[in-house]
Image: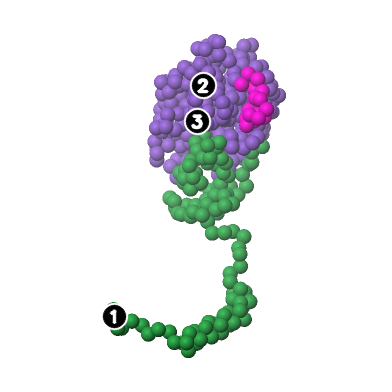
Chain colours: A green, B purple
Amino acid sequence: MSATAAAPLTRRALLRTAFTAAVLAGTGAALAPVLRARRPRQTLTPAPLAEETYRGRHIAVDVAGVRIDGRPLHVMRRADGSYLSGINHFQSYPTPLELARAAVDELGTTQLAFAAPHHG
Amino acid sequence: MHVRQNQKNLTSAQKKRFTAAVLELKRSGAYDALVRTHDKYFVPDRDRKLRVGHMSPSFFPWHRLYLLEFEKQLRQIDPNVSVPYWDWTTDTSPVSSLWADDFLGGTGRASDRKVMTGPFAYDKGNWTVTVGITESAFLTRNLGRPQNPITLPTPAELQWAIDDPVYDVSPWDSTATAGGFRNKLEGWAAPRSERWRNHNKVHQWIGGHMTGGTAPNDPAFWLHHAFVDLIWDRWQQRHPRSGYLPAAPLALGDLQRGRVIALDEPMPPWNVTPREALGHQGLYRYE
């Protein structure tokens, strides 16, 4: 057995630790409103689930949909769960990101319109 | 009764009359109303809504009526014009006479897919896209999709669809893979290695506007779908004892009830049933 094991905690050390913790907790409670106020506000647009630059175009996929260079791509679903878009009606893709890349392939340098016609 | 000709047999004078009538329809605003109709009735099959135009048994009769509407309006402008058909199993080149300057014009330029030649080129001043989902007012194409090459359907691929004796099968949508002429020809049913076939693949091969819901912005749409219409005739001739399905409205509890059109149910926006559109005797014939 080693003789260099850490000294056991004395009763005094134990009390000091407990006291320090209580002071810190009290300080924390007092500062809580300040800390809360400094926390960034919840924004209306959460961070994208996927984001990338593909062939020079910015693709963002979030819960609200797919955007290419900030403009919405109209997304639809097939019965098998795959994705179609306003650009690709005759071919579907397993994920929204692949759908967006396919739309960029088809668009070339053209931009999506901000307002597109909608289905009935 | 008029004749729908193979586009490769049209004379220069016939091509000129056809494109002139299409340009006049565009000028009047009626053409863009037709483009809107196609986009409006494209309902994907995960939606719990009625699907008449795509991913459903009424794909053939709905497009038959849609082409008839277009052709009726063309013939009001020029009674000698009809919709030509494009046999995409034989005229497979992006430089065939179909895409020449005196007919539909050629492919789009590489950067933005803008069509630069023929009567529908934006710079000619007669073809501004108003029903689109991009900012561009010009017609776009990407024939053969050079950055990721695709080939047009082969005669064998088309025959594979025509040889199926069953018109359509449950669940009557794009996932119907147990067989069925409709989904094999519409092109969602395909061997795993290929994914897409026939009708869908032709839309992809042309590219540009033709891949989207506003596909009829490209007049090539009508020639493509006239051939699809002719293929329905060929299937009927090959299987005289087969008919349109579903023959009766689907039973209560069927998830597709109210979402697909049975033989005697009316199709919007014309209120015509598939039974009434099974043939076209007395209206037109194919050469």
Numbered label attached to residue A2: 1
Numbered label attached to residue B226: none
Q: Amino acid at mark 1?
A: Ser
What chain does badge 2 belong to? Answer: B
Q: Which residue is mark 2?
A: B181
Say if residue A33 shows up in the picture: yes
Q: Which residue is mark 3?
A: B188
Q: Percent position (x, y) of residue B260?
A: 63, 28
Query: Could you tell me if the residues under marks 1 and 3 are in contact, i.e. CB atoms within 8 Å?
Result: no
Q: Amino acid at mark 3?
A: Trp
What chain does badge 1 belong to? Answer: A
Query: Could you tell me if the residues under marks 3 and 2 are in contact, i.e. CB atoms within 8 Å?
Result: no
Helix, strand or loop at mark 2? helix
Task: Using the numbered discs, state the Cα–Cα distance from disc 1 to disc 3 in whole angstroms.
Answer: 75 Å
Residue B250 magenta:
yes
Q: Residues within 10 Å of mark 3 (few under 14, many from 20)?
A: many
Residue located at (65% from left, 35% from top): B49
Question: What type of secondary structure mainly makes up the magenta span?
Answer: loop
Residue B232 magenta:
no
Task: Using the numbered discs, state the Cα–Cα distance from disc 1 to disc 2 in whole angstroms.
Answer: 84 Å
Q: Percent position (x, y) of residue B175?
A: 52, 31
What chain does badge 3 belong to? Answer: B
Count numbered badges in the picture.
3
Q: Which residues are magenta?
A: B246-263
* Both marks 3 and 2 on one chain: yes
Which residue, as the protein is rendered here, is positioned at the far right? B271
Say if residue B3 shows up in the picture: no
Q: Earlier in the sequence, mark 3 or mark 2?
A: 2
Q: Percent position (x, y) of residue A60?
A: 51, 53
Q: Residues within 10 Å of mark 2 (few under 14, many from 20)?
A: many
Q: Percent position (x, y) of residue B282?
A: 64, 11
Helix, strand or loop at mark 3? loop
